[in-house]
Amino acid sequence: MSHSQEHRTDSLVKRLNRIEGQVAGIKKMILEEKEYADVIIQLNSTRSAIQKISHILLEAQTEHALMHVSEGADLDEEMKKLQKVIAQYNKMN
């Protein structure tokens, strides 16, 4: 694993840990019967954090595909992989 990949993985895990905390907080808010508007604000914040992770992964897949093609990998195969990731990304938005 390259240094940049390790850094990216650490960053993603930290983001996921924060999301876990947000979800736990949302659960607590619901159990404590907090105002629905406040719960929805937290849900939107969590959704935004998840979308950011998806964006980071989409960028990583793009970089990965370009690097592999420049190293001689099959362009069509890399494009299929990238298109699959883009399709999944678009389902979130």
Image: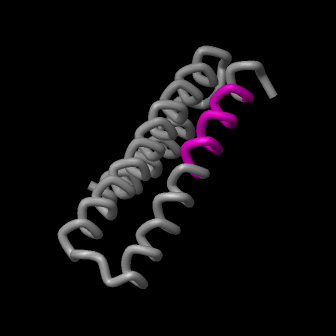
Q: Is residue 50 magenta?
A: no
Q: Which residue is situated farthest in the top direction here? A: 70
Q: Residue at x 68, y 36 (%)?
A: 9
Q: Main secondary structure of the magenta part?
A: helix
Color theme of the render: one colour
Front residue of this view, candidates 41 and 52: 41
Residue 24 percent across, percent down from the top left: 52, 68
Front residue of this view, candidates 14 and 58: 14
Q: Residue at x 55, y 29 (%)?
A: 65
Q: Is residue 8 magenta?
A: yes
> What is the total number of numbered labels drawn onto the structure image?
0
Query: Is residue 44 rendered to the left or right of residue 57?
Result: left
Front residue of this view, candidates 65 and 1: 1
Q: Which residue is situated farthest in the right direction here? A: 1
Residue 79 percent across, percent down from the top left: 47, 37
Q: Residue at x 47, y 44 (%)?
A: 53
Query: Is residue 59 rendered to the left or right of residue 48?
Result: right
Q: Residue at x 66, y 19 (%)?
A: 72
Q: Which residue is situated farthest in the left direction here? A: 37
On screen, residue 32 above or below 61: below
On screen, residue 25 above or below 4: below
Residue 1 percent across, percent down from the top left: 81, 28
On screen, residue 30 above or below 12: below
* Range shown magenta: 6-16
Query: Is residue 37 rendered to the left or right of residue 14?
Result: left
Query: Is residue 58 rendered to the left or right of residue 47?
Result: right
The quadrant in which residue 88 appears is bottom left
Of the 4 image quadrants, the one containing the C terminus is bottom left
